[in-house]
Image (cartoon, grey):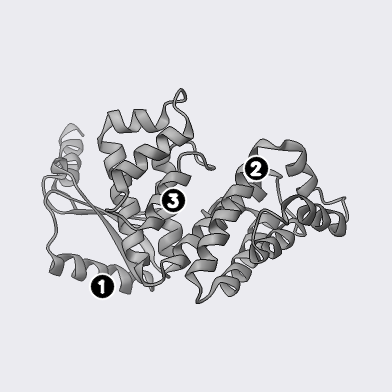
Amino acid sequence: MTSDFRGASADAVASLTGELEASVSGSPETATRVASDLFSVASTLRTEGALRRFATDGSIPTEAKTGLVGEVLGAKVSETSLALLRSAVSRRWTVASDLAHALEHLSVVATVRSVQGDADRLADELFAFGQTVKAEPSLRDALSDPARTIADKARLVEDLLGGKALPATVVLATQALHGTYRTVGAALVEYQKVAAAVAGENVATVRVARPLSETEERRLADLLTRQYGRPVHLNTVVDPEVLGGVRVEIGDDVIDGTVSSRLDDARRLLAG
């Protein structure tokens, strides 16, 4: 998600992330409130063009922008959130839409911080729900149907995940319904990357013909960790079409050791 920002916006997001981390450290309750506040403001900025342009206009004095934030939002958000929002509008943004996008990103970071030691579980649950949405056309259609209200879709998410997943997973799955990203699936992928990044991990998608044993997963994770120099969170996808072997996608890198890939190579050689 941070890779979506360029220039001044990338610098702003990096600084704001540091401020956020410091302000919610050790307080899950604060992190949860800040996450909710920031996503709510991000949603407002997307619908209120005049406010968005004012908040990101570099020609307007910082004092005017921070003053408006206090006037409009002071009674609606926590003091911690208000301080972050004032800091956000005082920064330069490459394009106006980046501010709302950045606040959504920060809301995900705050949500991850709210679960403390359960960040890996959160990442796993986001991936699992994303795979369910991808595999079930009726669910995907229900969550993307423009005729259904966000509240109706949110109830569906709650019915599916409530009591089974972390509350933070339900929150992010609900956010995915109406955030920056074009589809719920795309949002869940990006949210999981943020969760892994906050935990200091890369995300690797592993495609195999059969489920890996715990020993095999640990061995593969250790191998990738040594290769990439930081811990790696595995998303394992069982795909019978690979026939055998393993295909690993991590960032822009693809390591394809599947039988199906070798067969395709052989066919190309024979077709020569």
Q: Nearer the viewer, mark 1 or mark 3?
A: 3
Density class for disc 3 (Cα within 10 Å; few <14, some 14-19, many ≥20) is many
Foreground of the two, 118 or 243: 118
Three-letter code for the amino acid on which mark 1 is drawn: Asp
Indicate which disc residue 222 carries. Answer: 1
How many angstroms separate mark 1 from mark 3 (CA)?
A: 29 Å
Amino acid at circle 2: Thr
Label ID, residue 172: 3
For residue 232, above or below residue 129: below
Residue 95 x, y percent position in the rendering? 70, 45
Q: Position of residue 139 (x, y in %)?
A: 31, 33
Q: Is residue 254 visible?
A: no
Where disc 1 sits, the SS reads: helix
Question: Comparing marks 1 and 2, which lies closer to the viewer?
Answer: 2
Q: Quadrant of residue 14?
A: bottom right
The quadrant of the image that shows the C terminus is top left
Which label's residue is closer to the chain start, 2 or 3?
A: 2
Distance CA(mark 1)–CA(mark 2):
43 Å
Q: Which label is found at residue 44? A: 2
Question: Which amino acid, mark 3?
Answer: Leu
Describe the element under mark 2 as helix, strand or loop: helix
Residue 47 place in picture, x, y as percent: 66, 36
Helix or strand or loop: what does disc 3 sit on?
Answer: helix
Task: Identify the residue at horizontal 15%, vertical 40% (top origin).
Answer: 241
Q: Residue furthest bottom?
A: 26
> Going 31% across and 48% down the picture, which residue do you hit?
161
